[in-house]
Amino acid sequence: MSAAGRASHRAYPRAPWWRAAQGALRLAAALALTGTVAAQAPAPPAPAPAVTAGWNEGFFIQTPNGDNRLQIGFVAQADGRFALDDPLPITNTFVMRKVRPTFTGRVAKYIDFKIMPELAGSVVLLDGYFDIRFSPMLRLRSGKDKTPVGYELLISDAYLIFPERSVVSLLVPNRDVGFQAQGDLAGGRLLYSGGIFNGNPPDGTSAITDVDTNNGKDLAGRVVWMPFRSAQTPPHALTNFGVHLGGSSGTQTGALPSFRTSAGQTFFAFPATTTADGRRNRVSPAVFLYLKSFGSFAEYSRSTLDILTSGVPITVTNQAWGVTGSYVLTGEATSDRGVRPKKPFDPAAGAWGAVQVAARYAELRLDEELFTAGIAAESASRKTQQLTVATNWFLNNYVKIYATYERFSFSGPRANENLILFRSQLAF
């Protein structure tokens, strides 16, 4: 460039558009370099899914997809037992009837479990099982659970209408260890459960140990048919009408049952010289209906067992039946899962929960041969009648107050028993 050109260049600086173009080129180069470095650096790991927790009829914690879940429940029952007779057949007392933390949940989507110990009195495992869930039509259960025979006995303790079950439940087994299959068929109209169990518990009791005491086993099962259940809206008026049939059969030896009142008074016990020795068959049909505020069920139970008394074999058959009815005065619907108040307890808002009244009559008849053969004690009762009336106050979905009068009438020389039972219950 000539001296004149250089002078001209210095005299006339570059135009603004040129300077803007240079800046844009520098910015593009910087961005390209940054992108290259970012592409070479590994991407940060994705954050692990958060665990969710909250309240849904109990405290729960679970993974976001619900495949793994733990729910914590609790049942506490504080009772008052007061006899009205003179002399008193029992000591009037307050007692912790049940204290049961409950842990239920799910593992790996298809495995459900339940663990429930009893902490009131001696500590014992009541329920401890897990299910392999294939579909609503089939689940396989392993462990300790209620034996599927009696209708009233299979109602959860938290949802009982009265503080204690009827004498009908004295002839069916309670909890035992075994394997069973369960499921719902025909759109939920047919429910079934059945399996093989140790068969340890005498009538009306649970297994004391979780191992068998002999080589005999029991086959037990039940079916429930609810012919009007469907997914239609509104539901059929008889949606909660059903028929239940349960039973068990097995060969057992060893201990025989003792039969007690709601206050724990024994009105029949087999002597130590008499044991189970052979076949034991049980059957328990029932019918139930829950229609709006009205609920009722009737149940029959029959237990036939071979016994050995002083070396002499005998077959005896004991039978019981009972009818229960209830009505919710405040208008809420009832079911075998209790009452859910429309206006939970809130004194400041003038809400007091729900009130239910109920009545029950039940009767237990023992085999006459127990008395003619001299097996029964002189004070034993062959025929026992149970009359119960109650008022139940549901403060909310979790708290319930029972106020119950119960009368046991006995054949023979035994004096009748009149009781007032109170219960305050927290259950979720």
Image: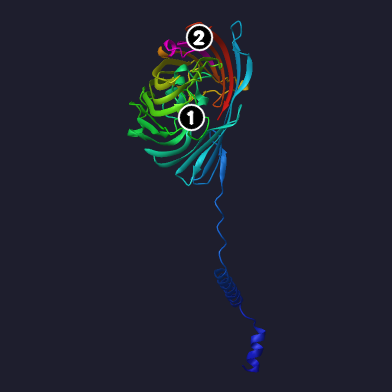
Residue at 64% from the left image edge and 92% from the top image edge: 4
Give 215 or 406, whichever is nearer the viewer: 215
Residue 410's spot in the image, x, y percent?
49, 8
Q: Amino acid at mark 2?
A: Glu
Identify the secondary structure beneath mark 1.
strand
Q: How is the image coloured?
A: rainbow
Tell me the quarter of the image containing the C terminus. top right
Identify the secondary structure beneath mark 2.
loop
Q: Amino acid at mark 1?
A: Arg
Where is residue 309, by image quadrant? top left
Residue 398's spot in the image, x, y percent?
56, 27
Give 264 or 104, whichever is nearer the viewer: 264
Tell me the quarter of the image containing the N terminus. bottom right
246 left or right of 35? Answer: left
**Which residue bears the numbered disc 1?**
175
Residue 146's spot in the image, x, y percent?
46, 30
Extent of the magenta region: 370-391
| Circle number at residue 292 | none
Q: Are marks 1 and 2 in contact (CB under 8 Å)?
A: no
**Which residue bears the numbered disc 2?**
378
Q: Is residue 311 above or below residue 182?
A: above
**Residue 332 inside the magenta-drawn segment:** no
Closest to the camera, between mark 1 and mark 2, is: 2
Give 212 or 365, whichever is nearer the viewer: 212
Residue 177's spot in the image, x, y percent?
47, 34
10 Å crowding of disc 2: few (<14), some (14-19), many (20+)? few
